[in-house]
Image: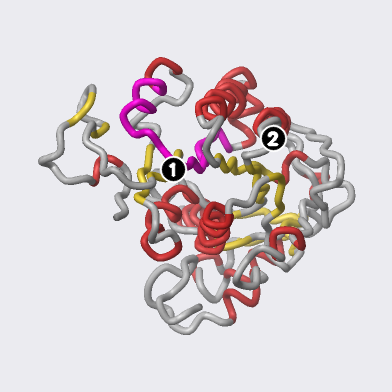
Amino acid sequence: MTHGPFLGMPEEMPLLGHGTLYEKVVMTRCALITGAAGLIGHYLVRNGPRWAPGWEVRGLSRADLDLTDQRAVEQVWKVIKPSAVVHCAALSRTKDCERDPQEARRNNVDATVGLACRSEDIPFVFLSSGEVFDGKAGWYRETDDPNPINAYGQTKFEAEQRVLENPRHTVVRIVLTAGTSLNGDRSFVEDMSRAAKSGKAIMLYGDEFRCPLPAGVIARAVWEVVNRGATGLYHLGGRDRLSRWEIGQALLPWYPELRGHLFEGVSSDHAGAPRPPDLSLNCDRLQALLSFSIPGFRAWLQNRMQREGDLWDYESTLA
C-alpha cells in the first residue's frame, strides 16, 4: 500500500494536530519520505508502488511538518513509527543559503541530524549534493575530499559527516535534476521554461559542467538502495558531462519555448553565489548495485518512446 503526502489520504481516517497528519497507521513496513512536495520526494512517493511494492510510503511536506521543530518531529515519529527514512527535504537554492546561512544550517544540518538520531536503528538515506566539491577537478569519486565553496555545499557536507557516523545510514550525492514538480518551481527545466515564457533571456555558461539526471531515474535508484539495504556514501549522476549550454541545446526539441531565449556565456560573468565549475560525478560504486544502467541526459531524451506523460519519469513500456 502506498500513500502520497498526507493531504491525499482517505478522509475518514482520524487526524493529528491541525488536520495535517494521520494517527491511524497500517501495521506494515513504513518508509517515510521528507520533502514530499519537492522534486525528488514527489517522484519517490509517486513511484513507490512500482519500485518499492513491499513498503507503505508516507510523504511529509513542509506544510505537514516543520522539520526544524524537534518537539513536533518527535510527536509525528511516535505516530508513524517508520521502518526506513529517505530524507529529501532541504533549503536547496544556493542564493537562499547564501542570503541566510543560519537558516540553511537549521534546515540542512540540524533537521538532518535530528532525523538521523531518531533513525538510529533503521535505514536512513540522506540526499546530499555534489556541491560539497569545489568543482576544480570533475568526475569526482566518493573517495575524493570535499571542499565546498558556498553555504549550501558546506551545510550538506556537515550533514553528511553526521549521518555517516552511523554505519546503518546512507548518503547519496546528486547534482542537477530534471523533472516536473507539484508546483512547477523545483526543477531547473521548469525555471528555464518559465523564464522563457515571460520573455527573459537565459544565460547558460559553456564552461560550467554538470551531469544531470531525470528525477524518475533518481527515484528508482534510491528505492533500490533502500530495498538492497545499501549503506555508506554513493554518487548518482548522469553519464553525460555537459556544459550548461549543452544542456540547454539538448532541451530545445522538448521545450520549444526556449528557442531564441538561450545565450551562451562564461562563468567568469557570474555575479551571484560561488558555483563550482565542474560537478561531474563518477557513479561506478552505485552502478554496481543497481539493476539498471544509469543513463546519460542526451540518451534519455533521444530514446523516449512517446511524448505523452512525464518526460522525466519512466514510462510503463520502459524497463
Is residue 89 depicted above or below 139 in this figure?
above
**Which callout, 1 or 2, points at the residue further toward the start of the chain?**
1
Residue 168: where, in percent of width, then height? Answer: 63, 39
- How many C-alpha atoms fall within 10 Å of the one at disc 1: few (<14), some, or many (≥20)? many
Residue 154: where, in percent of width, then height? Answer: 73, 30
- The answer to whether 19 appears left or right of 113 in the picture is left
Of tags 1 and 2, the one toward the viewer is 2
Magenta span of residues: 73-92
Q: Nearer the viewer, residue 204 or 250?
A: 250
Residue 118: where, in percent of width, then height? Answer: 50, 26
Q: Secondary structure at mark 1?
A: strand
Inspect the magenta stretch and tell me whether residue 300 lies in it: no
Is residue 262 depicted above or below 100 in this figure?
below
Q: Nearer the viewer, residue 309 or 194?
A: 309
- The answer to whether 319 appears left or right of 94 in the picture is left
**Residue positioned 64% across, 77% down in the render:** 299
Residue 3: where, in percent of width, then height? Answer: 30, 50
Inspect the magenta stretch and tell me whether residue 84 lies in it: yes
The quarter of the picture where residue 129 lies is top right
- How many C-alpha atoms fall within 10 Å of the one at disc 2: few (<14), some, or many (≥20)? some
**Residue positioned 37% across, 49% down in the render:** 57
Q: Which residue does the numbered mark 2 point to in the structure image?
A: 164
The quarter of the picture where residue 303 lies is bottom right
Alpha-carbon span between mark 1 and mark 2? 19 Å
User: Label 1 sits on what residue type?
Assistant: Ile
**Residue positioned 81% across, 56% down in the render:** 207
**Residue positioned 37% across, 19% down in the render:** 72
Quadrant of image for the N terminus: bottom left
- Tag of residue 33: 1
Is residue 216 depicted above or below 60 in this figure?
below
Label 1 with label 2: CB-CB less than 8 Å: no
